Amino acid sequence: MARIKPNTDEAEVTEKPEVAPEKPEVPKLEAVAEVKRGTEKRLQSGRLKLAEQVVVMRHIHFTNDVTVEDIESPEYWTHVGHTITANDRFTGTTDDGTRLIEGVILACGKQYAIAKVLQEYRLDAVPERHGKQNFKAEYAGAYDKWRVIRIADNEVMRAGFQAQREAVRWIDSHEQALRR
């Protein structure tokens, strides 16, 4: 390539310098550290598992008089401490079906467990019936559950209902049948 020098008639011949191909820019060490720090906040694939493979869910039949303080007491779990493990979850209902309790086992040993109750739900009670009542629904324990009793002679008409609302529904339908 020729170029004319200023204020002269001479031509200067210069060769075009070879341009080196551009190298990709290598991130500096600080930038690499930033990238690594950013991935710590992301969920890694090895940490995602099916709940059935990791969590054990247990169901408990609580007595009617159990309290949250009882359940969270390590002594409450004395007879079953050897069968449960930390992070087991539990859900359970009282015998009369009026409460639902959910929780988690935080730590355990052979004769104790430390549990935390996460939720306690009070299930809707059946509203009181008005008017002449010939029957009543009452809870009779773990075996008979809810039963219907005729008030006139305290005769058990039917037993084995799982919930109070089932017994009341039976009373309503039975009274309708008697009126026909």
Image (spheres, grey):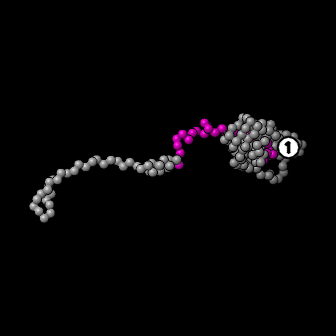
Point 74% across, 36% down: residue: 110
Residue 137 as seen in the image, left or right of residue 48: right
Q: Residue furthest left?
A: 9
Q: Position of residue 144 (x, y in %)?
A: 81, 38
Q: Residue furthest right?
A: 153
The quadrant in which the C terminus is found is: top right
> Between residues 14 and 118, which one lies in front from this camera angle?
14
Residue type pointed to by label 1: Arg
Residue 12 as seen in the image, left or right of residue 147: left
Q: Is residue 165 visible?
A: no
Q: Position of residue 69 (x, y in %)?
A: 77, 48
Point 82% across, 40% down: residue: 141
Magenta residues span 41-67
Query: Is 130 rendered above or below residue 153?
Result: below
Mark 1 Cα shell of 10 Å, populated few (<14), some (14-19), many (≥20): some
Q: How many numbered circles are shown?
A: 1
Quadrant of the rendered structure where residue 139 is?
Answer: top right
Point 10% across, 61% down: residue: 9
Q: Position of residue 117 (x, y in %)?
A: 71, 47
Q: Position of residue 68 (x, y in %)?
A: 76, 48
Name the residue beneath numbered marker 1: 150
Residue 26 as seen in the image, left or right of residue 142: left
> Between residues 113 and 121, which one lies in front from this camera angle?
113
Point 69% across, 48% down: residue: 118
Q: Secondary structure at mark 1?
A: strand
Query: Residue 128 in magenta?
Result: no
Q: Residue furthest bottom?
A: 7
Q: Is residue 67 visible?
A: yes
